[in-house]
Image (cartoon, helix red, strand yellow):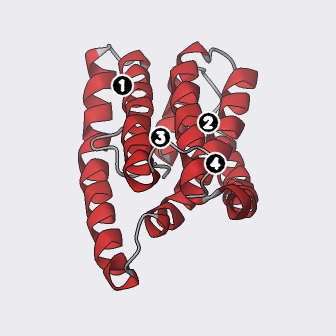
Amino acid sequence: MHLLPSYGVVIVINRKQLGSFGREIIHLPSTTAPSLLLVMNGVGVLGRVIPALVARRYGPLNLMIPLSLLSGLILFAWSGVHNQTEVIIFDVFYAFIMASGQGMFPPSLGSLTDDLSKMGVRMGMAFAVCGIALLIGQPLAGVLIQAHGGGYLYAQMYSGATMTSGVVFLVAARTYRVGWRWNVIV
């Protein structure tokens, strides 16, 4: 499951949703649809490793902000996916960017915390919010898909909107921490 935490109620693309989108909307054969999951998991490994190396130089929060914005834009672009080639390209880009954002979440929380004795509490609170978002997001995605008569457009637009609006909170956290100075590693 791919989720960029701390955005409130978000819809995430999990393995079932991407597979069902491939089967129901793109009309992929039932033998090909599971390959989307393999691609997502394989690319996700690179998405967690490569940005971690880049974050050492620029800071995890500084990297998480553009990654979150890019993932929201990719979710909006999901509505333009209409064939097998496009769904594979979407799968690769989304998996890499979302895994990158997920990998930056714990170090970003760490970069916002001065007192290391409070780190565990803050991580627990943030992941509790993520748990609530996961609990609510999946049924909400189903309701939005059902409201559109089995189409994914409502869910796609809602997920893109919540992801891009989450960038506002990330920028607010960064601004609260270091002000408007952009050359600071956070």
Q: Position of residue 40 (x, y in %)?
A: 65, 47
Disc nearer the start of the sequence (3/4): 3
Residue at the image position 56 percent from the left and 35 percent from the top: 71
Q: Amino acid at mark 2?
A: Ser
**Residue 28, quarter of the rendered image:** top right
Number of other residues with Cα within 10 Å of mark 2, as a class: few under 14, some 14 to 19, many 20 or more: few
Q: Is residue 14 left or right of residue 57?
A: left
Cα separation, mark 4 vs mark 1, equals: 33 Å
148 up-or-down from 155: above or below? above
Residue hosting label 4: 183
Cα separation, mark 3 vs mark 1, equals: 12 Å
Q: Which mark is residue 13?
A: 3
Residue hosting label 1: 158
Q: Nearer the viewer, residue 99 or 41?
A: 99
Cα separation, mark 4 vs mark 2, equals: 49 Å
In front: mark 4 or mark 2?
4
Circles 4 and 1: CB distance less than 8 Å? no
Q: Is residue 75 left or right of residue 176?
A: right
Disc nearer the start of the sequence (4/1): 1
In front: mark 2 or mark 3?
3
Disc nearer the start of the sequence (2/3): 3
Q: Circle 3 — which element?
A: loop
Q: Amino acid at mark 4?
A: Asn
Circles 4 and 2: CB distance less than 8 Å? no
In front: mark 4 or mark 1?
4
